[in-house]
Image (cartoon, grey):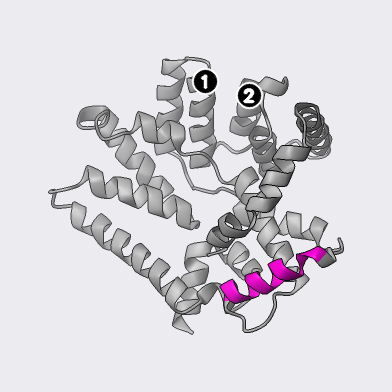
Amino acid sequence: QLAQWIDAHFNEEVAFLQRELTDEDFAAGQSHARRAIAAAQRLDPRDPVIAWHAYSMCTPAYGCDQDQAAAVLARVDPGNTWTWIRVADAAHARGDSVGVEQALARAADSEFTRTYFGQTALLVVDQLGDLPVSAGCAGMLRRLGQDLAVDRDAEPSDLTSAQASTIAAAMALPSFGGVLGTCAPKHASSGRNKARCMALFKRVAEGDTLMEQYVALSRLVQYTAGQRDGAQWRDRYRNLKWLLEQSRARQLWGRGPVEELWVQGEVPGLQARLKV
């Protein structure tokens, strides 16, 4: 629901940024971000969240070595499914098909699935929380309150949470492009590739964000259509869609601080609110 609200009401801000920010501004921002992340990595070179953000902010067009960022991520967060999906993306970008195969095999055999979305959002709120909200945001706060169904104009803290969700989504939620292409049904119809892709999406389906579960379960339903073991994935997919429907119908996003969902994970957090 927050994502829908952001899409509906941030168009003016996006248009403003497109008008006002030059390529030089964006390059300067990228450079500043990379310097900040490099400083953080020097302070704690084993922190997986910092390594995750270093990869997210790595834009080859602005001089960042994506292969090096992927190698650091693999070193500090080797048990994470998404680490190896990102390593596969970096290999795909350089045309290394063997590297893609090896990385996706590691992803399928990983120990856990974690995007650090909630941790990132909490870090952003910590930085934005003390900043004043412009008087020009009054209309935006009113609309946000209506969309969150809190029977009041939203508070500045609600807007901060919405902004934090947007920034965290950009920095922490990974792209599915590479893995969806490699594991498209036409490429994973049989044999070892299908088994590997099945194992990979089973890992992703254990993630705690709505995006991970929705994409992974929909792909697993496709893979197992007409098969005996397909029932469990169809059931999980239906249950997730039902949770989304109930979240909108019962206004679960507005029933408590969104920070609770960041800490608990979106799916388990919404499930807990549904039981209350």
Q: Dot 2: what SS?
A: helix
Q: Is residue 85 above or below residue 248?
A: above
Is residue 91 on the magenta stretch? no
Residue at x 54%, y 49% (from the top left corner): 114
Main secondary structure of the magenta stretch: helix
Q: Amino acid at mark 1?
A: Ala
* Mark sitting on residue 84: none
Q: For mark 2, what is the residue?
A: 66
Q: For mark 1, what is the residue?
A: 93
How far separated are the C-alphas under marks 1 and 2? Answer: 9 Å
Residue at x 65%, y 29% (from the top left corner): 72
Please tell me which residue lies in front, 168 or 224: 168
Image coordinates for residue 71, horizontal then vertical, percent = 62, 25
Is residue 142 on the magenta stretch? yes
Image coordinates for residue 86, horizontal then vertical, percent = 53, 32
Residue 56 in the figure: left or right of residue 212: right
Few, some or many C-alpha atoms within 10 Å of disc 2 (few <14, some 14-19, many ≥20)? many
Report the number of discs: 2
Please tell me which residue lies in front, 9 or 81: 9
Please tell me which residue lies in front, 25 or 211: 25
Q: Amino acid at mark 2?
A: Gln
